[in-house]
Image (tube, grey):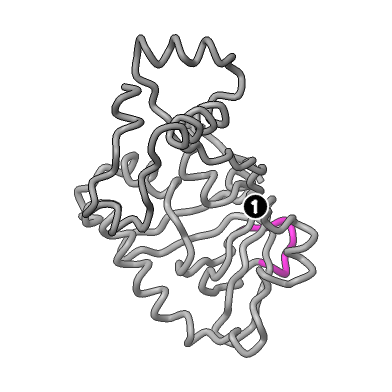
């Protein structure tokens, strides 16, 4: 290995690299200086012994970059969402006709979800499907409520929150109806189903994963 380190550079490579080979004492001095700089923690005699016994790979090691903690994007909290009015429907968008296409999409969605809604369909199977269904776009009618002013209101559901339904009536009025103490009817072709709001006090995303127990009677 020392002979390789101290061998002369061929003339053609010397022209390409733009360097000249050192000879004799100069070459020895350059080699020792290079090794001493590359292996500063070793004594000269240890270097000499190591060079005689095994090859040494001298390579450049780039300094490690310190990795900083990556911050995840923080979402808006409930107060910030309320201040920005993210979930509020603008007055110019409170039009019944604007949501009719959504209603048509919802009807097709429910038919596909319930495998056609045929007259011979199993009512319990349909009930279980509807309990976890998304009702945005459905036409809801308040059939019972402890607040008489809500009874009879009909409209397309445009937003479902944990405790309320927001519907648009044919008169282009946005109505906010609490789920608790209210019963809603939903017509799907020849089928009519009822929603007991007190048992629906969940967000639609939470309701899709919830297991419901069928009870004999449900009070307001």
Q: Is residue 147 magenta?
A: yes
Residue 173 spot, x, y in % from top left: 64, 83
Residue 142 spot, x, y in % from top left: 59, 64
**From the viewer's perspective, is 165 left or right of 26?**
right
Residue 48 spot, x, y in % from top left: 46, 14
Res 214 visible = no
Of the pair 64 and 3, the residue shown nearer to us? 3
Q: How many marks?
A: 1
Under circle 1, the secondary element is loop
Rendered position, 159 above or below 24? below
The quadrant the N terminus occupies is: top left
**From the viewer's perspective, is 87 left or right of 194?**
right
> Magenta segment, which residues?
144-150
The residue that mark 1 highlights is 162
Tell me what residue is drawn at x 66 percent, y 46 percent: 220
Residue 58 spot, x, y in % from top left: 43, 30
Rendered position, 203 above or below 102? above
Res 18 visible = yes
Q: Does the magenta stretch include residue 172?
A: no
Farthest-out residue, bottom? 92
Q: Which image quarter: residue 33?
A: top right
Farthest-out residue, front? 24
């Amino acid at each position: 290995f020392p002979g390789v380190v101290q061998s002369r550079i061929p003339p053609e490579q010397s022209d390409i690299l733009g360097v000249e080979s050192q000879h004799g004492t100069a070459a020895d001095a350059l080699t020792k200086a290079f090794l001493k700089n590359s292996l500063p923690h070793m004594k000269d005699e240890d270097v000499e012994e190591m060079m005689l016994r095994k090859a040494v790979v001298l390579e450049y090691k780039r300094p490690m970059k310190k990795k900083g903690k990556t911050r995840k994007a923080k979402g808006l909290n409930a107060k910030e969402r309320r201040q920005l009015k993210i979930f509020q429907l603008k007055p110019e968008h409170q039009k019944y006709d604007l949501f009719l296409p959504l209603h048509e999409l919802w009807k097709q969605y429910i038919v596909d979800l319930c495998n056609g809604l045929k007259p011979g369909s199993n009512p319990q199977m349909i009930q279980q499907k509807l309990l976890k269904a998304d009702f945005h776009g459905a036409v809801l009618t308040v059939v019972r409520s402890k607040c008489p002013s809500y009874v009879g209101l009909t409209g397309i559901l445009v937003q479902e929150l944990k405790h309320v339904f927001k519907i648009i009536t044919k008169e282009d009025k946005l109505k906010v109806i609490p789920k608790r103490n209210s019963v809603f009817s939903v017509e799907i072709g020849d089928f009519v189903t009822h929603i007991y709001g007190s048992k629906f006090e969940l967000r639609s995303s939470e309701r899709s994963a919830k297991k419901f127990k069928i009870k004999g009677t449900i009070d307001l």
